Image (cartoon, rainbow, N blue to C red):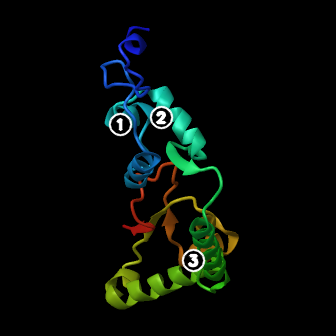
Amino acid sequence: FRRFKNNDFQLEDKERSGAPKKFQNKELEQLLDEDPSQTLSELGKILQVDESTVSKRLKGLGMIQKQGHWVPYELKPRDVERRFGTCELLLQRQKRKDFLITGDRYRLQLMRLSRALKEKQPLYAQRHDKVILLHDNARPHVAKPVKTYLETLKWEVLPHPPYSPDIAPSDFHLF
């Protein structure tokens, strides 16, 4: 009332310590483009505003948090195109012949390994030493054709406990 009495008719707020800092949506979008995994509190500290203010603005921008990242609720056209491209690449990859390692393919790999072992270590076969094979329990490794072939080679297969990838850092080991 005192301001109006003194002919001060300005309605704009003057800067004061309690007034919220104003920021543009572009600033918030730029921060999210740099790092979409920032939390509300991190964004609030950077923009010098309360978390609830940031939350309201993000909601207004149509952003939601999925798996720790801020993403638009509706995909932008470039994101839709990117997803279609990724899906097409995955479909093409699946149609390729060499995409999956099957039991038959693993058996052929063991055949090549057996031949290479005989070529590079000819004395090995003459001494009748046993080959000891360590491989994991992946389906191609325990398929029936593979087991049968390993029996014909008379290789000893070490038992591999399930869920122990630390024992076999590569696909297989020969001893």
Question: What SS does tag 2 mark?
Answer: helix
Can see residue 97? Answer: yes
Q: Which mark is residue 47?
A: 1
**Residue at 63%, 86% in the rendered image:** 97
Numbered label attached to residue 118: none
Residue type for callout 3:
Tyr
- Relative horizontal placement of residue 72, taking residue 26 as reference (left or right): right
Looking at the image, do the residues carrying marks 1 and 2 touch, with CB atoms under 8 Å apart?
A: yes
Residue appearing at x 59%, y 41% in the figure: 60
Amino acid at dot 1: Leu
Amino acid found under the numbered disc labelled 2:
Val
The disc, 2 or 3, on the residue closer to the chain's N-terminal end is 2
Q: Is residue 86 above or below residue 118?
A: above
Picture disc at residue 106 = 3
Whichever of callouts 3 and 1 sits on the residue coming sooner in the sequence is: 1
Where is residue 109 drawn, in percent x and y? 52, 82
For disc 2, the marked residue is 54
Q: Residues within 10 Å of mark 2 (few under 14, many from 20)?
A: many
Q: Quadrant of the N terminus?
A: top left
Viewer-proximal residue, 65 or 9? 9
